[in-house]
Amino acid sequence: MKSALILVILYSVWGGPALAAKTKMCFTKAEENAEQLVRSGLRLREGASGCDGPPWSFHTKPLWGQIEQKFGPRFKQQTDIRRKAFEREFAKDAENREQMWDGRTVLHYRDFPLSKSYCTELKTSLETMLKSGWGSFASRARLDKDPVEMDYRPCN
């Protein structure tokens, strides 16, 4: 009897058949890509902020500002793809889950130990993105050490 009651409660909490039909329990390749691009954008933004002031003074914040202006619509497009995946997979808790992952990523890179070599690499990445475009950023994002596959199961 307890088992049946628990199942009924879980069924109602997780959204019943309507949610079960929508949820894939995985991220598509496009959704994984969008998640990786969002995370990489957060890394660049936080790094640009950290490497801009003393003692590093790499003047990276203005570079990030140019990237935001130039690629803002592309970042929004990727954020929208990601948000739809979160809404599908996490339904009622989608906004909280999205904020949780953003917060985790921001906190990691905001507290990342800065060094001359890190700030030099970050500034080079920002300059390359401005010069070579979105494709260079997307290629670089795939190489980051923050693989989405570790957090979400890919759809087959």
Image (spheres, helix red, strand yellow):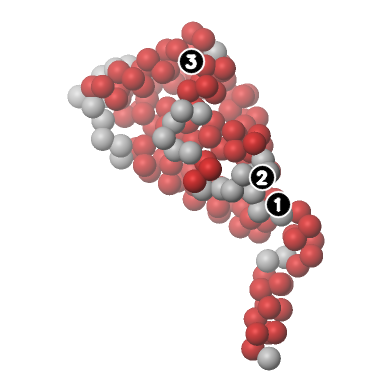
The residue that mark 2 highlights is 155
Residue 76 point in image, percent of width and height: 62, 30
- Residue type pointed to by label 3: Met
Residue 5 picture quarter: bottom right
Q: Is residue 120 visible?
A: yes
Q: Amino acid at mark 2?
A: Cys
Tell me residue 81's x, y (percent).
Answer: 66, 37
Could you tell me if residue 69 is visible in this image? no
Cα separation, mark 3 vs mark 2, equals: 30 Å
117 sits to left or right of 126: left
Q: Classify 10 Å Cα crowding around label 1: few (below 14), some (14-19), many (20 and above).
A: some
| Residue displayed at 51% across by 29% down | 142
Closer to the N terminus: mark 1 or mark 3?
1
At label 3, counting other C-alpha atoms closer than 10 Å, the crowd grade (few under 14, some 14-19, many 20 or more) is many
Residue 114 position within the rendered picture, expressed as x and y whole percent measured from the top left = 26, 30
> Which amino acid is tagged 1?
Lys
Q: Earlier in the sequence, mark 1 or mark 2?
A: 1
Badge nearest the viewer, 1 or 2: 2
Rendered image quadrant of residue 12: bottom right
Look at the picture and state if 104 lies above or below 113.
below
Secondary structure, mark 1, is: loop
Q: Quadrant of the N terminus?
A: bottom right
Query: Circle 3 sits in a helix, a strand or a loop, which is it?
Result: helix
Label number found at residue 129: 3
Q: Nearer the viewer, mark 3 or mark 2?
A: 2
Farthest residue to the top: give it. Answer: 131
Compared across the picture, whether 1 is left or right of 143 comes to: right
Name which residue lies at 38% across and 43% down: 107
Q: Residue furthest bottom?
A: 1
Residue positioned 43% across, 41% down in the render: 105
Which quarter shows the C terminus?
top right
